[in-house]
Image (cartoon, rainbow, N blue to C red):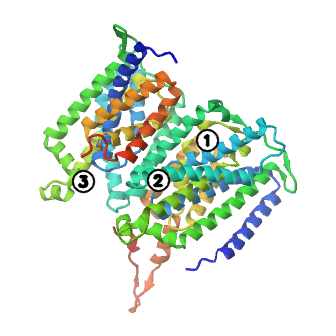
């Protein structure tokens, strides 16, 4: 398997350009509005998968990292507003800032909990969301429990409507995060993470620097989640702690890779596009509570019935194709060996 | 800040009482996570389910919430046993419990919460019982019965569980399954059956804990989330799988939370348990009474 990241980047940027062009051709701004959410989930689930899928450590704190990114944007916005600074901070800078903040928090929490069994890390991430929410609620500068308003500019030169601009930045971020995930998957880091996922003790014994690799994965994953959150205040324009720290982000970013398939960068992409689009449709046609219920049920159903996600189903279908043996009888190949413990 | 001795004593006492309640909330996790090594992060959701059962029965028939909870424990036990069976067949037997098992319980947590939201909305629900209004006074110390009664019943529950685990055959088998499954099998005991029973009991305690919760405070479906960090912090601090340790850790967390909310404001209290959790994991992962 060769890496060829530049080629991958070019191809996916072309695909991204086609997507953007297609959305422009539709001519309705709702496409950008809904598409932004789907792209945001592509980034979040790809980021989750870097730690969860490649390394096997479950992060329930997606909302916490996401909200860190969002609230660092709010803090910058307030700072710029309070000090009468002349310029609006561009979104890519905010993304980098949110990424740095979330990355640092991810590193710190990983350092404290990753040396222990995986379950502790998962529990700590779950509690992290509660604590960060407590901090934000008590921090009046970023709005406290009342929430914060962020006014977005009407238009952006060259692109037009601001939602289109947000869509475009999120599209680029999605491409970048997919490229990063793919690069990790096929590098020494990725193989190291896979050994940790399969047998941490054996990996440690064979000289894999497990803690360092886990920390790198946690930091990258957290940083990408923060970057996905940074433009969010501009998208939603009213940021409120309860919804920003909502469990929806956590459940979605877990469900999407698990439904798509966790072992490759394609899985989260498939899962996020399918589930994200489905949710947009259900939210509009039925209700948002039903849409969350749907995600929960799909998650449970997939982990029980199809542990390797859609990609796994696809592989199994390819392997199960009846083959002719030398006498000419049709026989069905056995199940894939990974089903055996 | 005005420091007053009354305030301190009252905060301590209410911390201890709340701690007793936390012990009941955590008992189930001590059984499932501490002893069986099943990371049931959906436990708080089952507690909320217990609260709603108590609420429905109380609102329609006016029955006492705690009695209701005791009556419905068998139903919760069956639910728990069924969940364990699914968990065993789908994850434990395949050796996939770490990633997918966690996701499974997370999904259960989510489904329970959203279903409750769909049926009951996000309004706060509460129950009525004779002991919910009055308060006993001893000198300057207030003992609201609303908290005292759940605390006492919860300590009783823990005592019964501890007796069960140490004195009965099945209880001792549950303790043994945590240590050596193979040895248990050699004694002609089916470890899966023992685990199923233990997990059933763990969920059954959620019925009682839910009733306590709705007696102490009004409940809405997402309240359970606040308890996830708390419950696991207490379980780890208490030394994973030790009921006496759980009680001590629960009281400790209760006292610190109560002091925090008395002297710094209630909005800071949720951060306490997380601080405890991180501190314990970083400094002494074996907990206070670690084996």
Label 2 Cα crowd, 10 Å radius (few <14 / some 14-19 / many 20+): some
Q: Residues within 10 Å of mark 3 (few under 14, many from 20)?
A: some
The answer to whether one can see residue B55 in this image is no
Q: Residue at the spot x=52%, y=61% of the render?
A: A216
- Could you say which is closer to the camera, residue A286 or residue A100? A100
Front residue of A332 and B69: B69
Q: Is residue B220 visible?
A: yes
Mark 2 or 3: the one toward you? 2
Residue at x 54%, y 35% (from the top left corner): A134
Q: Nearer the viewer, mark 3 or mark 1?
A: 1
Q: Is residue B52 above or below residue A44?
A: above
Q: Position of residue A162 (x, y in %)?
A: 80, 49
Chain hosting mark 2 = A
- Residue at 34 percent of width and 10 percent of height: B136
Mark 2 lies on residue = A111
Q: Secondary structure at mark 3?
A: helix
* Disc number for residue B192: 3
Where does residue B19 sit, x and y in percent of width and height?
35, 28
Chain of residue at mark 3 = B
Residue at the spot x=81%, y=38% of the render? A84
Q: Above or below — where is B44 with respect to A91? A: above
Q: Where in the figure is residue B112, as x and y percent of width and height?
A: 46, 40
Query: Mark 1 packing: few (<14 Cα in 10 Å), some, or many (20+)?
Result: many
Secondary element at tag 1: helix
Letter of the chain that mark 1 sits on in the rendering: A
Most distant residue in the top direction? B139
Disc 1 designates what residue? A244
Mark 1 or mark 2: name the one nearer the start of the chain. Answer: 2
């Amino acid at each position: 398997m060769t890496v060829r990241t530049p080629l991958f980047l070019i191809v996916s940027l072309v695909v991204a350009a086609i997507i953007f062009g297609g959305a422009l051709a539709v001519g309705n701004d709702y496409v950008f509005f809904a598409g932004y959410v789907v792209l945001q989930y592509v980034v979040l689930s790809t980021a989750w998968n870097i730690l969860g899928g490649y390394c096997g450590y479950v992060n329930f704190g997606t909302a916490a990292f996401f909200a860190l990114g969002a609230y660092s944007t709010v803090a910058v916005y307030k700072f710029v507003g309070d000090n009468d600074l002349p310029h609006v901070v561009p979104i890519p800078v905010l993304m980098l800032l949110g990424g740095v903040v979330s990355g640092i928090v991810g590193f710190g929490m990983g350092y404290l909990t990753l040396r222990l069994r995986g379950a502790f890390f998962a529990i700590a991430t779950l509690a992290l969301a509660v604590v960060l929410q407590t901090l934000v609620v008590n921090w009046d500068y970023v709005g406290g429990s009342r929430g914060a308003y962020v006014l977005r500019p009407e238009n952006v030169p060259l692109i037009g409507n601001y939602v289109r601009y947000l869509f475009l930045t999120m599209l680029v971020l999605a491409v970048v995060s997919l490229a990063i995930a793919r690069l990790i998957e096929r590098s020494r880091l990725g193989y190291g993470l896979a050994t940790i996922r399969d047998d941490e003790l054996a990996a440690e014994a064979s000289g894999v620097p497990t803690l360092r690799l886990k920390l790198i994965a946690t930091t990258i994953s957290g940083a990408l989640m923060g970057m996905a959150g940074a433009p969010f205040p501009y998208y939603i324009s009213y940021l409120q702690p309860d919804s920003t720290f909502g469990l929806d982000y956590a459940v979605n970013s877990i469900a999407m890779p698990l439904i798509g398939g966790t072992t490759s960068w394609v899985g989260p992409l498939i899962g996020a596009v399918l589930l994200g689009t489905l949710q947009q449709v259900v939210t509009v046609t039925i209700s948002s509570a039903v849409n969350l219920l749907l995600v929960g049920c799909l998650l449970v159903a997939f982990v029980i019935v199809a542990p390797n996600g859609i990609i796994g189903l696809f592989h199994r279908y390819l392997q199960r194709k009846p083959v002719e043996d030398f006498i000419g009888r049709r026989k069905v190949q056995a199940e894939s060996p990974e089903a055996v413990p | 800040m005005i420091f007053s001795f009354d305030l301190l004593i009252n905060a301590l006492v209410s911390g201890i009482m709340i701690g007793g309640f936390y012990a009941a909330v955590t008992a189930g996790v001590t059984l499932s996570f501490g002893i069986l090594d099943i990371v049931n992060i959906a436990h708080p959701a089952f507690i909320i389910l217990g609260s709603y059962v108590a609420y429905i029965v109380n609102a329609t028939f006016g029955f006492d919430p705690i009695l209701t909870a005791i009556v419905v424990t068998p139903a919760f036990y069956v639910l728990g046993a069924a969940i364990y069976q699914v968990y065993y067949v789908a994850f434990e037997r395949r050796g996939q419990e770490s990633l997918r098992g966690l996701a499974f319980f997370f999904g259960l947590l989510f489904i329970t919460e959203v279903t409750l939201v769909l049926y009951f909305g996000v309004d706060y629900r509460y129950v009525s019982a004779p002991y919910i209004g009055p308060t006993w006074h001893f000198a300057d110390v207030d003992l609201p019965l609303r908290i005292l009664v759940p605390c006492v019943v919860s300590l009783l529950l823990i005592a019964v569980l501890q007796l069960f685990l140490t004195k009965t055959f099945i209880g001792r088998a549950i303790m043994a399954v945590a240590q050596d499954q193979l040895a248990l099998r050699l004694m002609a005991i089916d470890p899966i059956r023992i685990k199923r029973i233990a997990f059933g009991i763990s969920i059954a305690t959620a019925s009682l804990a839910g009733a306590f919760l709705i007696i102490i405070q009004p409940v809405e479906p997402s309240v359970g989330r606040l308890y996830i960090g708390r419950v696991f912090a207490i379980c780890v601090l208490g030394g994973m799988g030790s009921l006496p340790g759980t009680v001590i850790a629960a009281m400790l967390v209760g006292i610190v939370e109560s002091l925090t909310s008395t002297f710094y404001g209630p909005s800071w209290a949720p951060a306490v348990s997380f601080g405890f959790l991180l501190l314990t994991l970083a400094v002494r992962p074996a907990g206070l009474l670690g084996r």
